[in-house]
Image (cartoon, grey):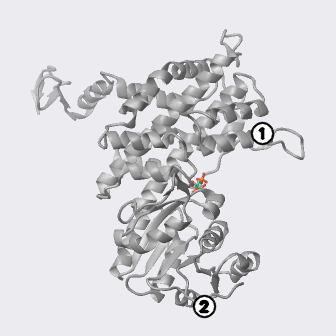
Amino acid sequence: MSKPDSLAQIGVVGLAVMGSNLARNFARNGHTVAVYNRSTARTDQLISDFGTTGNFLPSKTVKDFVATLERPRRAIIMVKAGPATDAVINELANEMDEGDIIIDGGNALYTDTIRREAEMSAKGIHFVGAGISGGEEGALNGPSIMPGGPAESYESLGPLLESIAAEVDGVPCVTHIGPDGAGHFVKMVHNGIEYADMQVIGEAYQLLRYAAGMEPAEIAEVFKNWNEGDLDSYLIEITAEVLSQVDAETGKPLIDVIVDAAGQKGTGRWTVKAALDLGIPVTGIGEAVFARGLSGAREQRNATIGNLPGGELTTLEALGVDRGQFVEDVRRALYASKLVAYAQGFDEIKAGSDENNWDIDPRDLATIWRGGCIIRAKFLDRIKEAYDTNPGVESLLLDPYFKGEMGDLVDSWRRVVILATQLGLPVPVFASSLSYYDSLRAERLPAALIQGQRDFFGAHTYERVDKPGAFHTLWSGDRTEIPS
Ligand code: 6PG
């Protein structure tokens, strides 16, 4: 290890893969990095493996770690979300002074971040909840970073984060998102969109495999091809990689030997819970979370697979569907459903921002999500343009560009949902996103009937289309209407 003679510009606490990769990224970019891990074995490992790649200052105690940081001290915590994070924050805060900055780079629940920020601010310490996306590779070579917390902390922190973030067109994929929990809220919704994005890709795969009868290697080629167009994105790119992988042990496509039960750490679920509280219908994200849950319901599936009536799986040929047209229709259904998921995610961010007075600029997100993060995609440029043109647009789908796209996609989307239904293949996000889209377009929704029912059993009253006020019908009396 080369011996730095100065203090560290930044410190990293928690040296599992994400933390050590982040520390290496800072070091590679010329910063002296203080590192600390509860068990010293990880610290020793980092220094022995990568100590020569930059300036690291390892410490065995939190006290020593804090002492190696230049002022204002800046320490990023990369530990498991929850009580472990609280424990580390308190240990650090005990050693720090006013004006120092603690950054939580984990996937914390934003309400925890709001609480922690208030606790730290009472001590004069800046607490920054920062969403960091890009997985292990991103942490090492350039993530997308979504810091919240006090704006003034960004003055000292921003340049450091900008030096390690991914860059697109010379613009670093990091910016101050807003106060207290804004950064973690935005990262949470990012992950919700990630869930929906992964699920729609999964639904497209399922259709190509079991409706069009294509093999994984062939489908990998289709995804590679799709990655050249509107769908150009990291998740489509890695899908092609996963589908072309062959299992060394069996010689089968790897996809066929992976158990079809999706895991989840909870950020998708949080996105949906928060959306429910905010009253924002994030139906695509919701269905994606439920689809993961259903996939993992092993006992229930063991009992139901092959044991529920529903008709035999028929073929495209039997239905007279052209395979080439079908593949293109699936691409369009995927794209349309994906646009809905982004539109819903941005709606949730707007609602969260309004509710918490965060003043989040959606253009910032469209900019910093273009690189580094898991949902990076070419069409984010279009989202930025949409908000540039009309910052108050009621739904991204109403932006002229996306409206035009929807016009091109909607017929294919309908065909795919109809066909999947006929074939008995599940497409929860394709179908629910289409219903969401049609609900937005509908002149009349059945909500009028729901109001009538509510008034019938609970005298909850209703409004009329032709005059102001609230009304109640005397359902169990003579059924006249009275103002309420
Ligand atoms: C990212 C990822 C990352 C992680 C999530 C998702 O943006 O880099 O979202 O945060 O992969 O924890 O994990 P689950 O699928 O397990 O919820």
Question: What residue sits 31% from the left and 44% below the top?
Answer: 391
Q: Position of residue 150 (x, y in %)?
A: 36, 70
The nearer-to-camera label among 1 and 2 is 2
Using the image as rendered, state which of residue 262 and residue 357 is in the foreground: 357
Q: Position of residue 56 (x, y in %)?
A: 64, 81
Helix, strand or loop for disc 2: loop
Is the residue 49 above or below the residue 362 in the image?
below
10 Å crowding of disc 1: few (<14), some (14-19), many (20+): some
The residue under label 2 is 5
Side (left or right) of 136 relative to 283:
right
Residue type, numbered disc 1 = Ser
Helix, strand or loop for disc 1: helix
The residue under label 1 is 244
* Quarter occupied by residue 477: top left
Q: Position of residue 85 (x, y in %)?
A: 52, 72
Side (left or right) of 322 relative to 268:
right
Using the image as rendered, state which of residue 431 and residue 187 is in the foreground: 187
Question: Which badge, 1 or 2, is on the more N-terminal residue?
Answer: 2
